[in-house]
Amino acid sequence: MQVKGYRNEGIRGAKTDRIDALLIVKVLRFGDYKESNIPTEDLFALRQLTRVRSDLVENGTRTKLKIIGILDQVFPEYKELFSDIFGTSSSALLTKAVIPEAIEAIPTKQLTALLKKASRGRLGEKHAQKIKKKAQGSIGITMGIDAFSLSLEILLAQVRHLEQQVAKLDKEIGNRVKRREETLTSIPGIGRTQEAVILAEIGNFDQFRNDKNGAEKLVALAGIDPKVKESGKYTGKAKMSKRGSSYLRKAIRQAAFVAAVGKGKDPMFSKIYEKKLSEGKPFEVALSHVENKMLHVIYSLLKSKKEYKPNI
């Protein structure tokens, strides 16, 4: 990123191996660079695991959106039958049949047994009859239905496989994080997965520990710091730099949302959020203030090894 910045010194912005080599030499010659911090082996391994997990989850989300898109075409009424299309009960049914004609062909007794087992008794014959009725009167397309059926079958299998891989990673990540005995999960919104991502992306905390601006540097590492543009009398709007770790930024955002507006919201973080909203700040800006504060709290807990207590 630093070498890339030097490329702008040339008017033409040309790029060749020879030019790249010269740019690297210039960066080193003028000493205008920052050294990379290499994490310890355990954190390096944890970073690899958490990043793969994040990528698999995103892949799973994209695949689920494709499934929803196909279901909207072949069985648009299906989303009315289950609160979660990818929940246990719905998944059990889709494993058995994916198109209206196939679902309608399942005997009511067999469908009832399938639903009862998957839902642990919550759903029974009444819901089975409702499903068959919706399947019978579906307005979904029928042209090329075999292709849509096979597509759904493959995509659903892919989702199940991804979920199994994520579960496998969660187990390994959880074991590694427990051994570190940190206290970040005492912060509302931060579970084991978020804690693992935060620790892995921060890496060697010693680079921040004795720095008087350590907390601000953590904020910058997450790319949540403001990027200011000023020239003469002109002052542009300060925007989030987004120049740090996208994995860390995503984990902090998820935790901040839960702490500020989630079911188990925290009194301190929610107060910051509500205060910014009352000042006329939009949702994204108000939440960014919560994210900033949370990173300061994380810095404090990593340094002191104490558990979080809200300070209102």
Image: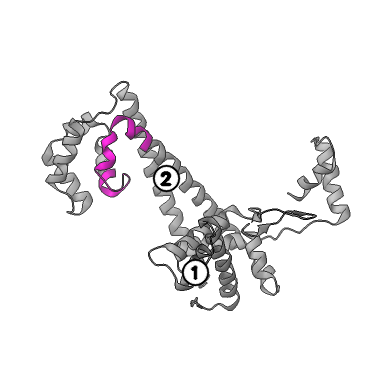
Outermost residue toward the top?
143
User: Residue placed at 31% from the left, 44% from the top?
Assistant: 85
- The span picked out in magenta is 68-91
Outermost residue toward the right?
29
Q: Position of residue 17 (x, y in %)?
A: 80, 37
Q: Secondary structure at mark 2?
A: helix
- Whether residue 135 sits left or right of residue 267 in the image: it is left
Q: Is residue 13 above or below residue 48?
A: above
In the image, 279 versus 51, the foreground residue is 279
In the image, 235 versus 90, the foreground residue is 235
- Look at the image and tell me whether residue 292 can be seen: yes
Give yes or no for residue 278 being in the magenta stretch: no
Q: CA distance from mark 2 to mark 1?
A: 34 Å
Q: Position of residue 6 (x, y in %)?
A: 81, 46
User: Residue placed at 54% from the left, 59% from the top?
Assistant: 281
The amino acid type, in three-letter code, at marker 2 is: Leu
Give yes or no for residue 85 being in the magenta stretch: yes
- Whether residue 97 sits left or right of residue 204 in the image: it is left
- Look at the image and tell me whether residue 40 can be seen: no
- Closer to us: mark 2 or mark 1? 1
Q: Is residue 215 above or below residue 170?
A: below
Dot 2 or dot 1, earlier in sequence: 2
- Whether residue 215 sits left or right of residue 145 in the image: it is right
- Dot 2 surroundings within 10 Å: few (below 14), some, or many (20 or more)? some
User: Residue placed at 19% from the left, 46% from the top?
Assistant: 115
Mark 2 lies on residue: 162
**Dot label at residue 221:** none
**Dot label at residue 269:** 1
Q: Position of residue 60 (x, y in %)?
A: 43, 44
User: Residue placed at 56% from the left, 64% from the top?
Assistant: 289
The amino acid type, in three-letter code, at marker 1 is: Phe
In the image, 278 versus 174, the foreground residue is 278
